[in-house]
Amino acid sequence: MHKRQFLSAIACASLALTASTAMAQDKFKIGLILPMTGPFASTGKQIEAAARLYMAQNGDMVAGKKVELIVKDDTSAADVTKRLAQEMVVNEKVSVLAGFGLTPLAFATAPIATQSKTPMVVMAAATSSITQASPFIVRTSFTLPQAAVAIADWAPNNGIKKVVTLVSDYGPGIDAEKYFKDRLTFNGGQVLDTLRVPMRNPDFAPFLQKVRDLKPDAVYVFVPSGAGAALMKQFAERGMDKAGIKLIGTGDITDDDILNSMGDVANGVVTSHHYSASHNSPLNKKFVAAFEKANNGLRPNFMAVGGYDGMRVIYEAAKTTKGAGGQALLDAMKGQVFESPRGPMFIDAQTRDVVHNIYIRKVEKVNGQLYNQEFATLKDVKDPGKAR
Ligand code: PHB
């Protein structure tokens, strides 16, 4: 190669490099890591659909940059989540990591967020301590203690004094059990036994038999979104309701995604949660209608709302920083106050965790469809799991 040719080749290469760097800078990349296949695929589907709806409604430009949503399936395996997060940070240079359908997936990724100083928006996972795993985590889902305490206050005032708890044996289940038990006991109720079922492929039958033998007023249940239908079916098949045992729980059990397919056994079940698709506000009605329209009639559940609000937090923070990432982006996420389809919410600047209303709801038929009908509201509930 002649010297001139060589120099011009270098010039071209560096031009190409400048162009591609400029393009990278003109993009604002969000790495959305979700379980899109396997037993928790409904969580991935709901959150991806909500994120896309947010972008369709708010545009794909923020602070003069084109928003690129990169969706990856972690199959709900924590080592995969972690590897995908690493690749997104190193190769894609994402400004934000988001998603996290289950607690172990969020914990596995937290060190990547810390080391790379990349804000990590947890849209689904709900074990209280997750936000403490990295100073770069912000949560838009909920925490199990928020929901558990609320139903433990409601139950003893409504004839439910003796309870057996039945939870999935991992982070959120253990939170759901502990905060319910402590509060119910404080309120003068009694937990007769604490049963824990495997998180994956649980066979509820032997546990429900145990509940039947103990004859409590109610069984209090936490299973992760997507697993509620199997439990409800077995609850009905064993005639638990006919034996006079009520079912209560956090709203994960009467998840809007599958509630309508549960049939009559779900009718009348009382739960506590931060979101119902039938939440009565103009903003929620608009959200549900747009979500259903864009997704063949699929009803949004609380996972969708965590994803939708997570996108809001990201967009508004990016506007504040004019598209800059890292610590500045994180700081702009803290303290955001806004109206969500769930009702009013904010991101506590100290804890980086969500503060919102918790509603007590009862499953009822509305126009032939089963919905969680909210009938009482606890306002601005902070995570009881955080040290005061
Ligand atoms: C979690 O793994 O943190 C989790 C998953 C599904 C839920 C709640 C919590 O419904």
Image: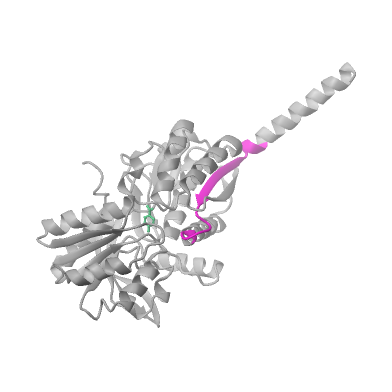
Q: Residue at x 28, y 73 (%)?
A: 269
Classify residue 111 as left or right of residue 80. left
Outermost residue, left direction?
A: 188
Picture quadrant where residue 282 is located: bottom left
Range covered by the magenta-colored residues = 23-41
Task: Return the x and y of residue 202 as percentages of the image width and height.
Answer: 37, 62
Q: Nearer the viewer, residue 40 or 250?
A: 40
Q: Nearer the viewer, residue 286 or 155?
A: 155
Q: Quadrant of the N terminus?
A: top right
Is there any visible trace of residue 1 in the rendered image? Answer: yes
Outermost residue, front direction?
A: 206
Is there any visible trace of residue 360 in the rendered image? Answer: no
Count the marks.
Answer: 0
Check the image and tell me how it is coloured: one colour
Classify residue 262 as left or right of residue 81. left
Ligand 1's quadrant:
bottom left
Task: Return the x and y of residue 169 as percentages of the image width and height.
Answer: 32, 54
Q: Residue at x 32, y 64 (%)?
A: 251
Classify residue 383 as left or right of residue 293. left
Task: Return the x and y of residue 242 as percentages of the image width and height.
Answer: 24, 81
Q: Quadrant of the C terminus?
A: top left
